[in-house]
């Protein structure tokens, strides 16, 4: 787990007044969790953007409010769709001794070096994230799996091939370990599949797909906060 920290100040600007806050170089945020009431907060755009980029929704963040440090995880990130500037962040406080569920990225190791790629085949990643459970101190920033041994278009990697660090488990105890992480394709077969998909109109705007609408179920207070701002 990385030591990521961010100082937050209490925020009095709400509703339409938040627009001026953003113009002044601040990002509005909300901190919620446990038995405490949600707290409206703010922090500098530059440092908050850096923390959001590094921590994502998978690494714990030490947030400091009025000199008090608490551990939290980012539950939602709102970006301006036009300016691509951070607009709002929701933090959920967590206990360092409690196991939490979060989503971490899966990174393929050895891209361009596998026997399959050297033979002219193509390796594509099918699953880019997976939900895991662990105490904050054991949460990895990502999970890695090597593709070096992939050689033919019959080879693949599944969740069963993914080695979880000590203290880390899949969030779903009934997780289907046969789910494919990476497949090997013949270039001609891949091109034919892409052309067929394009003809059926199933290729969607990747940019829109990458930007989540928010975690309304997990962060009702955050959603309400963001909507008024």
Image (cartoon, helix red, strand yellow):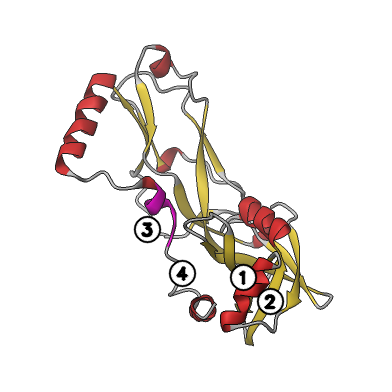
Secondary structure at numbered mark 4: loop
Please tell me which of labels 2 and 4 falls first in the chain: 2
Whole-angstrom CA distance, mark 2 to mark 4, is 19 Å
Contact flag, marks 4 and 3 (Cβ < 8 Å):
no
Residue 72 image point, x, y percent: 66, 68
In this orientation, which residue lies closer to the viewer: 211 or 128? 211
Query: Which residues fall within the magenta stretch?
Result: 207-212
Whole-angstrom CA distance, mark 1 to mark 3, is 29 Å
Residue 105 image point, x, y percent: 51, 47
Q: Which residue is mark 1?
A: 91
Whole-angstrom CA distance, mark 3 to mark 2, is 38 Å
Please tell me which of labels 1 and 3 falls first in the chain: 1
Q: Which residue is mark 4?
A: 215
Contact flag, marks 2 and 1 (Cβ < 8 Å):
yes
User: Residue visible at 34% across and 18% down?
Assistant: 121
Q: Which residue is mark 3?
A: 174
Q: Residues within 10 Å of mark 3 (few under 14, many from 20)?
A: few
Instruction: Check residue 41 in the rendering and tell me which mark sits there, or answer none.
Output: 2
218 above or below 164? below
Most frequent secondary structure within the magenta stretch? helix
Please tell me which of labels 4 and 1 falls first in the chain: 1
Whole-angstrom CA distance, mark 4 to mark 3, is 23 Å
Q: Does the magenta-highlighted stretch encompass residue 210?
A: yes
Mark whose residue sits in front, 1 or 3:
1
2 above or below 220? above
Residue 9 image point, x, y percent: 76, 75
Please tell me which of labels 3 and 2 falls first in the chain: 2
Contact flag, marks 1 and 3 (Cβ < 8 Å):
no
Q: How many marks?
A: 4
């Amino acid at each position: 787990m990385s030591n990521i920290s961010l100082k937050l100040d209490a925020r009095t600007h709400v509703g339409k007044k938040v627009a001026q806050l953003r113009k002044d170089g601040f990002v509005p945020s909300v901190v919620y969790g446990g038995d405490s009431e949600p707290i409206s907060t703010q922090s500098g755009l530059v440092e908050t953007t850096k923390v959001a980029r590094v921590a994502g929704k998978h690494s714990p963040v030490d947030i400091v409010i009025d000199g008090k440090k608490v551990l939290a995880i980012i539950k939602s990130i709102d970006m301006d769709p036009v300016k691509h500037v951070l607009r709002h962040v929701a933090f959920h406080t967590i206990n360092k001794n409690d196991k939490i569920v979060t989503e971490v990225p899966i990174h393929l190791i050895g891209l361009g070096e596998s026997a399959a790629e050297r033979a002219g085949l193509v390796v594509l990643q099918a699953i880019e994230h997976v939900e895991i459970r662990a105490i904050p101190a054991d949460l990895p920033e990502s999970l890695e799996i090597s593709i070096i041994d992939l050689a033919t278009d019959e080879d693949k990697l599944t969740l069963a091939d993914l080695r979880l660090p000590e203290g880390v488990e899949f969030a779903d105890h009934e997780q289907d370990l046969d789910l494919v992480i990476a497949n090997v394709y013949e270039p001609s077969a891949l091109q034919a599949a892409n052309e067929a998909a394009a003809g059926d109109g199933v290729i969607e705007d990747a940019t829109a797909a990458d930007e989540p609408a928010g975690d309304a179920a997990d962060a009702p207070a955050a959603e309400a906060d963001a909507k008024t701002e």
